[in-house]
Image: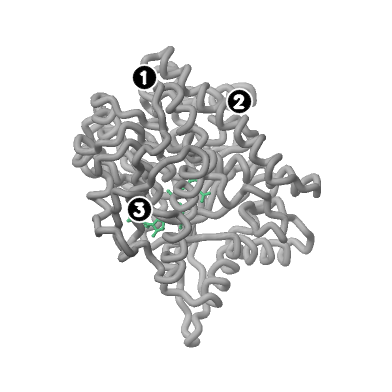
Amino acid sequence: MAILAPDSTTTIPFSSNGHQDTLLELNPFLIAQRQLAEAVEILELDDATHEMLRWPMREFKFVFPVKMDDGSTRVFHGYRVQYNDARGPAKGGLRFHVQETLDTVRALAAWMTWKTAVVDIPLGGGKGGVTCNPKELSRSELERLSRGYIRRVADFIGPHNDVPAPDVYTNPQIMAWMLDEYEAISRQHLPGVITGKPIALGGSQGRADATARGGILTLREAARTLGMELQGATTAIQGYGNAGAFGHKLGAELLGLKVVAASDSRGGIYNPHGLDHDALGQWKQRTGSVVHFPGAEAVSNEELLELDVTVLMPAALESVITGHNAARVQAKIIAELANGPTTPEADHILHDKGAYVIPDFLCNAGGVTVSYFEQVQNAYNLYWTAAEVHKLLEAKMVTAYHSVREMAERMTVHNRLAAYLVSVDRVAAVMKLRGWV
Ligand code: NAD
């Protein structure tokens, strides 16, 4: 059997034993389609349902100009993909990254579709981004880029059809500029058009650390399933941004994890005695990176993944645990705060060696769950306390974790496939109710 590579006429080998070629390993959208195909086969879905779920319902690709501080104009490539909105408005973050491509956005939008379904919130899946290096842009250039992006997509987004949020290298300030631009175009207050906003502009309590908090809750439940004690458990975190740094803080506070390694795009650090969250946060704030943190030795991002730790949290980018290094990963539990960190080939290797993977769109669903709470608060113009948000988030994450665990046990499949079975079934059922398939 062969599948068509998106955006090309190339066919690549497709096998069911998890051994894929390099093209598949490098293209997240092919990975997303491959993961879906496994679930579709088990669920025995018809061809039309599979075809609807295999492709984005709508996608926008555009260029837009940005005036730079030196008076020149640069043209940027932007994307917004509405993968599936059968269960509700498309929902998903915006990424500003040099490696952003249409296929990365498609994959992330597909995973958002499964993510909103696994936590059972009434939203679909979407994603967007701009190919750029935000570290090279001044604050005012970043603002003009953010506003320019919204001017291109304003006709297609909105509280009732597609709602962006932060992702890699975007943050609440960027959401604030985007909201302001959207409201200027719409000539009315519509805070529900975007989530992850600053609290003063209609953001939600508990949104900043929601992705990590949700992941830590699934990790707690996983440890209970496995009968493991996590107090003092050694932990390595790849990617020390929103998801990773809060993963450190909440992992230590709520579960007593001992984080011994952390990394970012510039490299990693390791200290077998443990890394203090506050001190490391201040260091990164001051120097721009975790590297050279006093008392720690240097490790590469690749070495960090293979450290002898109990818990591994990939919290950076896609396809870092692959067929090439999965056999050397020693962690007992892999809590995927990042989207798409593990390739299908690596999944099989990890499963065979008994590693317990909490799959990405379950583990990191706390972010979109609190984004959904943010939209609800915006709609009511009534705001909740952090304690209320945490309680609702915990209920959603615990229920989602156990629906996946039960599916994995019932079908004797690994957790990622179980999560797909839960989510794809829910999206397919709604498409059927709507009469699409
Ligand atoms: P962020 O921009 O806050 O942080 C990203 C971090 O990753 C930075 O520390 C950066 O230096 C590091 N990084 C970048 N390239 C790296 C590399 N090659 N090796 C190691 N580290 C690298 O982004 P974030 O919001 O924390 O997102 C991280 C991951 O979590 C992404 O996969 C994202 O899609 C996922 N995620 C985020 C949210 C959210 O609410 N922010 C929700 C769900 C999933």
Q: Are marks 3 and 2 in contact (CB under 8 Å)?
A: no
Most foreground residue, 316 or 152: 316
Secondary element at image label 2: helix
Residue under numbered circle 1: 413
The reply to whether residue 310 is in sight is yes
Relative to 174, residue 208 above or below: above
Considering only order in the chain, which callout, 1 or 2, is on the residue closer to the N terminus?
Answer: 1
Considering only order in the chain, which callout, 2 or 3, is on the residue closer to the N terminus?
Answer: 3
Q: What residue is at 41 percent from the left and 74 percent from the top?
A: 136
> Does residue 54 appear to the left or right of 2 in the view shown?
right
Report the amino acid beneath label 1: Val
Q: Residue furthest top?
A: 410
Q: In which quadrant of the rendered view does residue 74 lie? A: bottom left
The quadrant the C terminus occupies is: top right
Q: Residue furthest front?
A: 273
Q: In which quadrant of the rendered view does residue 268 lie? A: bottom left
How far apart are the alpha carbons under marks 2 and 1? Answer: 24 Å
Secondary element at image label 1: loop
Residue under numbered circle 3: 262
Q: What residue is at 40 percent from the left and 14 percent from the top?
A: 411
Residue under numbered circle 2: 430
Secondary element at image label 3: strand
Most foreground residue, 330 or 191: 330
Report the amino acid beneath label 2: Val
Of circles 2 and 1, the one toward us is: 1
